[in-house]
Amino acid sequence: MRRPWLLAAALAAAAAVAPAQPPKADAPPKNRNARWGLPGPAKADPQSKDSYLIDRPQYVLSYSDKKKTANWVAWNLVKADVGRVARGAFEEDPGLPAGFARVQFNTYTGSGFDRGHLCPSRDRSAAEADNDATFYMTNIVPQSPACNQKGWERLESYCRDLAADGKDLYVVAGPWGIGGQTEAGQKALTIGRRAPFVSVPAAVWKVVLVLPNRAAAPNKTTARLIAAWMPNDTTVTDDWPKYRVPAAEVEKKTGLTFFPLVPDDVATALKERADDVKVVVPPRAK
C-alpha cells in the first residue's frame, strides 16, 4: 500500500541524483486508476483537510475531513480485478495523517444507513489486500439501503459485466449535497452518536468511461460514457438506467471535470449527452 510520505521521500531522492525536468501536462499518471486524469484538485498534504489525496494501487481518492467522507474516488476496472476472495472488514483508514478524525465501523451502527462503498468490494476481489483497501472508512458513505442495495448495486454489477467482456473501465464516484433518507424514510443530515459525525449525502453519482480494450484510446465512436445520479433515499429502484444523465450535468453540479486528459473534442462530445445504450436489468433471483 503506497504511503504519501514514502512517495515524497522517493521523489526527493530521485531529484537529488537526476536533473530537474519540466513536467509534461499530457504525461499519463503512473497510477492506472488515474490514467485519464483526476476530476479535481487534491494534495497529500495534511494542511489540505478538505481535499486530502490518498493514492493507492486500488484507487485514488480525495477525502474531506469536514464531511468525513470522500469527495470522490477514482479507479480502473478490468476483468482481472474481479475474483473470489472473501470480503474484508470495515476499519479506519491508516493512511490518514495526524489531526484527521477517524471514522469507525460503529459510527454507522443504528443510523438507518448502509455503509455504502464508492469503489465496490467486488471490483477489487482478485487479491485480499486489494479487497481490504475497499473497506477503509474513507471509501464509505452513508447510503439509504434502497439506493445502495438496488440501483447502485445494479450499476456496479453492470460495470463488472462490461469488464468481464474485456472492456477497460475508468470510474469516478462520489457523494453530493447534505441530507438523505434512512431506511424508515426519515431525513438525516449526519450520522454518529458522538463525534466524529459523518455527513449524509443527498445524492450519489458515478461516471464511467468505457473503452473497448486496454489498448484503445477514447474517441467519439467507440468510447462510451455512462453517468448516473441517484437520490440517497427510499425511492431508488433496481432500474438503474433511468438515473442516467449527461456527464456534463454531473460536472455542473459537482464542480468537477471528469477525465481531463481525454482530448477536449472527444470529451465534450461524450459528456454532452446521456448514455442511451439499451440496458435490460435482469430480475432478481427468487
Image (tube, grey):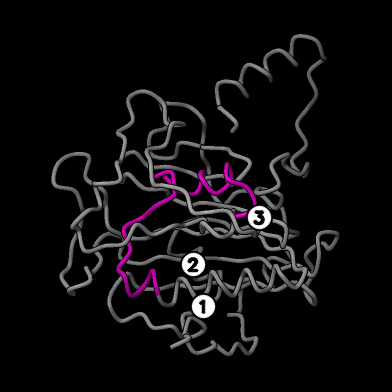
> Which numbered circle lies on residue 245?
1
Q: 233 left or right of 88?
A: left
Instruction: Tell me the mark number nearer the camera, choosing from 3 and 1.
Output: 3
Residue 77: which quarter of the image?
bottom right
* Quarter of the picture holding the N terminus: top right
Query: Which amino acid, by three-letter code, is at mark 2?
Result: Val
Residue 243, horizontal then vertical, whole percent = 46, 80
Residue that mark 3 sits on: 76
> Which numbered circle lies on residue 116?
none
Instruction: Tell me the mark number nearer the camera, choosing from 2 and 3.
Output: 3
Distance from the alpha carbon under mark 3 to that under mark 1: 21 Å
Distance from the alpha carbon under mark 2 to that under mark 3: 19 Å
- Vertically, is 243 above or below 65? below
> Which type of secondary structure does the marked residue at label 2 adopt?
helix
Which class describes the residues within 10 Å of circle 1: few (<14), some (14-19), or many (20+)?
A: many
Residue that mark 2 sits on: 250
Asked if the residue at tag 1 contacts the one at tag 3, i.e. Cβ–Cβ closer than 8 Å, the answer is no
Residue at position x 53%, y 42% in the image: 41
Which class describes the residues within 10 Å of circle 2: few (<14), some (14-19), or many (20+)?
A: many
> Which type of secondary structure does the marked residue at label 3 adopt?
strand
Q: 267 left or right of 129?
A: right
- Vertically, is 210 above or below 127? below
Range drawn in magenta: 125-149
**In terms of depth relative to the viewer, which is nearer, 219 or 239?**
239
Residue 181, horizontal then vertical, whole percent = 23, 69
**In terms of depth relative to the viewer, which is nearer, 105 or 146?**
105
Residue at position x 71%, y 60% in the image: 78
Residue at position x 38%, y 39% in the image: 50
